[in-house]
Image: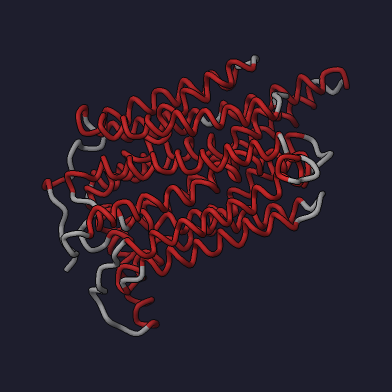
């Protein structure tokens, strides 16, 4: 890499988080759950619409999880991380832009577009994460990983703020109403994501391919390498335990990100309050992610992860019992303080464990477990809510108790997430502080 390249490469890498976080904020966490419930799934019972959204998240997670490790291995062998990053970015951008033309009541089309957008978003993250060990020196992994998440909070938050203003004051932008503003907001996300990603493709270097082979042979070798990866992960106890722990606790994190607004709507909170709380998360999360990066360096990554997990457990319990609007803001503030930290430190900790030259392959496995977790979490939340509703309606069939039943079933659904944080914390406790041998092996 040329002497003047590293700083530019780091900023180019971080700008991808700035770009794609618009999807995570405006679409995934913000407007899509609201618009899906009130526009594309209008008139449907809240528990049913929540289940539809949860299963849509699960569909996307299953697709990415099934492809992630092999795609990562192919990218490592072919030196094509950036090519795959661009391909998944294009899928996500196109799916997001399609929201603009979907008519009211088309919940199936909305779920399919949403799932496609999630596939693009999640698939791209495999190759984005895999570029971290390439552009970051080992001693700077925590700081640069946190920089990416901080840039994501700021970039995603800025566009989200603009989109919120569009929906609150649509006439300022020459739009007929809030519904039109939301649809235009989805289009701005597509433009933001695609436009700022160009800096990543231009500034971040792609190391030369360590192997040269035909496409068919590359796929065959990728499958063999995946089996080797699984065997190595199993043989390295710190890697194996960390991956399983991550599988569980990141499930809880992703579920809260994707389902929080839907949950608040189901409890009857006003849309404006939910959106304002999300803005709070973005702008508090920006400095909090940077501070967590420093905390990981000074206090230790593992202890910092335990701190974040403890906060998430309290958040989940509080969420299951909250009744007032101010409580939702309090929970949003607590999430903002730890969300970026737990994501950034998990990524940098794993980057220390993996062999050099096989980052996409191992991050494919890392992201596969994360996306399998994203299958379980939203699906668990939706299934628990439906099961609780069915059970309670059988016990209390009176129309007078219908609202109470729906409320209790909704609270049971969020409470189910607590078990994921608990299992993840127990497994993380048994992960050695440093990888065995204290070094990363190079690929042979």
Residue 427 found in image quarter: top left
Q: Quadrant of residue 341?
A: top left
**Quadrant of the snapshot with the N terminus:** bottom left
Relative image position of residue 183 (x, y in whole percent):
71, 49
Query: Image point 43% across, 60% down: which residue?
Result: 68
Is any part of residue 304 visible from this angle? yes
Q: Position of residue 395 (x, y in %)?
A: 78, 22
- Who is closer to the viewer here, 234 or 185? 185
In the image: residue 191, left or right of residue 18: right
Q: In this figure, which colouring scheme has been used for the structure?
A: secondary structure
Residue 161 image point, x, y percent: 57, 37
Residue occupying image coordinates x 26% and y 47%:
239
Quadrant placement of the C terminus: bottom left
Q: Nearer the viewer, residue 347 or 295?
A: 295
Is residue 50 visible from the viewing direction of this image?
A: no
Looking at the image, residue 198 lies above or below residue 270 = below
List x then y, in percent, for residue 11.
32, 51
Figure label count: 0
Taking 103 as reference, is 421 left or right? left
Q: Residue at x 35, y 82 (%)?
A: 217
Q: Single out the residue that lies furthest toward the right.
A: 399
Q: Nearer the viewer, residue 234 or 165?
A: 165
Outermost bottom residue: 214
Q: Nearer the viewer, residue 345 or 216?
A: 345
Q: Does residue 165 appear left or right of residue 225 in this picture?
A: right
Q: Residue at x 60, y 16 (%)?
A: 321
Q: Is residue 227 above or below residue 386?
A: below
């Amino acid at each position: 890499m040329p002497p003047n390249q590293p700083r530019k490469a780091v900023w180019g890498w971080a700008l991808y988080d700035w770009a794609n976080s618009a999807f995570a904020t405006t679409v995934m966490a913000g407007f899509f759950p609201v618009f899906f419930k009130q526009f594309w799934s209008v008139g449907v019972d809240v528990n049913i619409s929540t289940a539809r959204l949860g299963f849509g998240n699960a569909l996307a997670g299953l697709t990415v999880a099934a492809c992630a490790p092999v795609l990562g291995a192919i990218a490592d062998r072919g030196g094509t991380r950036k090519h795959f990053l661009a391909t998944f970015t294009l899928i996500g951008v196109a799916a997001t832009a399609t929201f603009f033309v979907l008519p009211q009541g088309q919940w199936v089309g909305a779920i399919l577009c949403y799932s496609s957008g999630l596939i693009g978003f999640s698939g791209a993250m495999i190759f984005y994460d895999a570029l971290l060990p390439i552009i970051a020196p080992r001693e700077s992994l925590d700081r640069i990983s946190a920089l990416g998440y901080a840039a994501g909070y700021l970039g995603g938050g800025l566009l989200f703020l603009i989109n919120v203003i569009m929906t609150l004051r649509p006439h300022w932008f020459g739009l007929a109403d809030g519904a039109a503003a939301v649809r235009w907001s989805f289009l701005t996300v597509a433009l933001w994501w695609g436009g700022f990603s160009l800096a990543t493709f231009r500034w971040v270097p792609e190391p030369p391919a360590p192997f040269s082979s035909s496409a068919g042979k590359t796929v065959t070798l990728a499958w063999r390498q995946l089996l080797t990866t699984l065997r190595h992960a199993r043989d390295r106890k710190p890697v194996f335990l960390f991956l399983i722990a991550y599988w569980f606790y990141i499930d809880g994190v992703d579920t809260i990100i994707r389902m929080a607004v839907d949950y608040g709507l189901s409890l009857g909170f006003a849309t404006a309050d939910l959106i304002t709380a999300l803005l709070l998360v973005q702008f508090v999360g920006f400095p909090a992610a940077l501070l967590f990066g420093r905390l990981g360096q000074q206090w230790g990554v593992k202890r910092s992860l335990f701190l974040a997990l403890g906060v998430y457990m309290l958040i989940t319990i509080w969420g299951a019992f909250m009744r007032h609007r101010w409580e939702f803001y309090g929970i949003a503030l607590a999430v903002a303080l730890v969300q970026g930290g737990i994501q950034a430190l998990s990524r940098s900790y794993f980057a220390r464990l993996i062999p050099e030259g096989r980052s996409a392959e191992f991050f494919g496995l890392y992201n596969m477990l994360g996306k399998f977790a994203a299958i379980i979490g939203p699906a668990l939340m939706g299934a628990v809510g439906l099961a609780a509703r069915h059970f309670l309606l059988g016990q209390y069939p009176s129309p007078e108790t219908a609202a109470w039943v729906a409320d209790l079933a909704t609270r049971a659904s969020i409470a189910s997430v607590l078990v994921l944080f608990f299992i993840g914390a127990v497994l993380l406790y048994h992960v050695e502080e440093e990888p065995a041998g204290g070094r990363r092996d190079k690929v042979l």
